[in-house]
Image (spheres, rainbow, N blue to C red):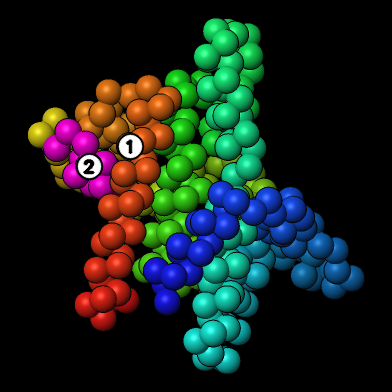
Amino acid sequence: MSLLAILLAYSLERTLEVTRNLHWRRLVLRWQHAQFNNTQLQQWRQNNLGQVFWALIPALLVGFLLAIFNSLLLSFLISSLGLLVAIQAPQARAAYKAYVIAQEEEDAAEQAYQLRRLRQASGRQQAAPVEHLLLWIHLRHYFAVMLYFVLFGVMGALLYATLRDMRHERSEGWQTLQQIMDWLPTRAMGLGMLLVGNFRQAAAVWLSAIGNKPQNNFIALTKIAEAAEQLTAQTTVALVKRNFLLYIVLIALLTIAGWL
């Protein structure tokens, strides 16, 4: 069931244009800004912990309802829909297509503009080359959602997407939370890239990211990818596609074996 939900959702994401009002990010932001007459509730939502817990309620409710009804068909439908709204990244997809066109036409100004759009879509503040931004967008919008779905079901995927997309105040605690939730997907995606890329060069880099003091996930991911492949915009897209297919095959094998 997990494999079918993943294949359906990720196929529809490429072919079906979902209205922005149904993107998980938009739903979470609406929920965060919902107004209630209860003064105590409003005050509780002002502190950092209350703000995070409040944003997570929709994802928790989805998991709670699926547990109550315990229907295989309902779980499949909700899982597929949940994945579909969680992985939406239309701005990044449009910016990349425009970037490739500008690159072919040697339009440096347009390339720079589309690169800024990609950086905005990635959620990063610092400048980075297009290859690194594509890796980060794929990790946070596609791979990590799939990984947490396989491990914890649709509720896990939606909890991750909530923490990825919710509005928050920048703080050291929030950066630590982001570091923790992206740690496992970064290393898992890195493992896949070294298996489908240059294993000999990338293995040592991946082991360093595992064994040493946890480093910045963005840096760890880009270092592994650079060791696994000579990166350009096109080779990066090819690398993440091979990595994704590797994990689809792995999920299929685990499903056949009865472990999923």
- Decide: marks 1, 2 in contact (CB < 8 A)? yes
Furthest residue toward left = 200
Name the amino acid, label 2. Val
Tell me which label, 1 or 2, sits earlier in the chain: 2
Which secondary structure, mark 1?
helix
Q: Quadrant of the C terminus?
A: bottom left
Furthest residue toward right = 37
Name the amino acid, label 1. Leu
Magenta residues span 187-199
Residue at 77 percent across and 70 percent down: it is 41
Q: Is residue 43 left or right of residue 123?
A: right
Reading the image, the residue beneath label 2 is 196
Residue 34: give x, y in percent of width and height: 81, 62
Q: Is residue 137 left or right of residue 40?
A: left
- Residue 167 in the magenta stretch? The answer is no
Q: Which mark is residue 239?
A: 1
Q: Is residue 61 left or right of residue 79?
A: right
Q: Which mark is residue 251?
A: none
Q: Quadrant of the N terminus?
A: bottom left
Residue at 25 percent across and 47 percent down: it is 192
How much space separates mark 1 and mark 2, taking CA atoms?
8 Å
Residue at 58 percent across and 16 percent down: it is 102
Could you tell me if residue 229 is visible in this image?
A: yes
Residue 50: give x, y in percent of width and height: 65, 63
Q: Quadrant of residue 77?
A: bottom right
